[in-house]
């Protein structure tokens, strides 16, 4: 029998999740990592993007169909700084448009950074006046990074490659390979926990 009952561990996880403990730890570690890179404690630029996680029976009614990715599941919207560190995360059904999440994502970014972010780099899924106005209300200018020519294979785009790398990092965590969660808040919490693990590893490497 395990010395740590599952129910007790889960209850403590839920308490910390509700209290924002994982976000606070990630924020402090992000500041430390930036200072070790000789950067300002808070970023002035961010990159926003989303990925769709394949649904499982646990994700239930939240699962929607992403017509672009041809996949049913949940969509994870994130914002990172220019080093790839997580600033904000938001989970929706996969059929939700990226541009419709700008207001909430931008508000989360400014809350996490003390309103230091001035510009956010995005892909063409964030075009339109509504998205620009939503970001502007939070004091952020959206800059769309477009393909300069027809896409053939993998293309490394300025700025945007950073958030794709972050998705690659978190995608290596088995719990984040698919949407195994019943609640969107739990899926968000696992992203913060993954961010903490990544930041701890990076900070230890720099301070060694």
Image (cartoon, helix red, strand yellow):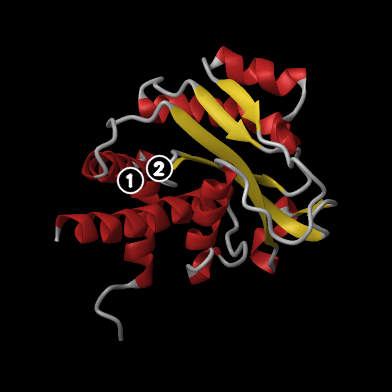
| Cα distance between the residues tagged 1 and 2 | 15 Å
Q: Nearer the viewer, mark 1 or mark 2?
A: 1
Residue occupying the far bottom of the picture: 1
Q: Position of residue 89 (x, y in %)?
A: 52, 42
Residue 96 seen anywhere in this rendered image of the structure:
yes
Residue in the picture at 82% in, 51% down: 68
Dot placed on the residue nearer the N-terminal end, 1 or 2: 2
Q: Position of residue 11 (x, y in %)?
A: 36, 57
User: Which residue carries the number 2 mark?
Assistant: 18
Residue 12 seen anywhere in this rendered image of the structure:
no
For residue 196, what is the image quadrant? bottom left
The N terminus lies in which quarter of the figure?
bottom left
Q: Nearer the viewer, residue 118 or 137?
A: 118
24 relative to 136 in the view: left or right = left
User: Which residue carries the number 1 mark?
Assistant: 26
Residue in the picture at 37% in, 71% down: 6
Residue occupying the far front of the picture: 149
Q: Is residue 101 above or below residue 54?
A: above
Q: Position of residue 64 (x, y in %)?
A: 78, 52
């Amino acid at each position: 029998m395990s010395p740590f009952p599952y129910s007790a561990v889960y209850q403590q996880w839920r308490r910390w999740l509700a209290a924002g403990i994982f976000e606070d730890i990630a924020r402090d570690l992000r500041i430390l990592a930036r200072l070790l890179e000789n950067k300002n404690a808070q970023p002035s630029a961010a990159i926003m993007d989303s990925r769709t996680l394949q649904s499982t029976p646990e994700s239930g009614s939240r699962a929607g169909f992403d017509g672009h990715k041809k996949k049913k599941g949940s969509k994870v919207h994130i914002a990172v700084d220019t080093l790839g560190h997580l600033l904000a995360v938001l989970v929706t059904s996969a059929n939700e448009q990226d541009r419709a999440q700008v207001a909430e994502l931008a508000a989360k970014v400014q809350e996490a950074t003390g309103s230091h972010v001035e510009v956010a780099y995005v892909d063409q899924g964030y075009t339109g006046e509504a998205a620009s106005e939503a970001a502007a209300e939070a004091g952020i200018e959206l800059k769309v990074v477009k393909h300069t020519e027809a896409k053939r294979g993998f293309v490394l785009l300025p700025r945007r490659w950073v958030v794709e790398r972050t998705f690659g990092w978190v995608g290596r965590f088995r719990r984040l390979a698919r949407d195994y969660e019943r609640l969107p808040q739990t899926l968000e919490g696992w992203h913060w926990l993954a961010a903490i693990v990544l930041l701890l590893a990076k900070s230890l490497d720099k301070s060694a």
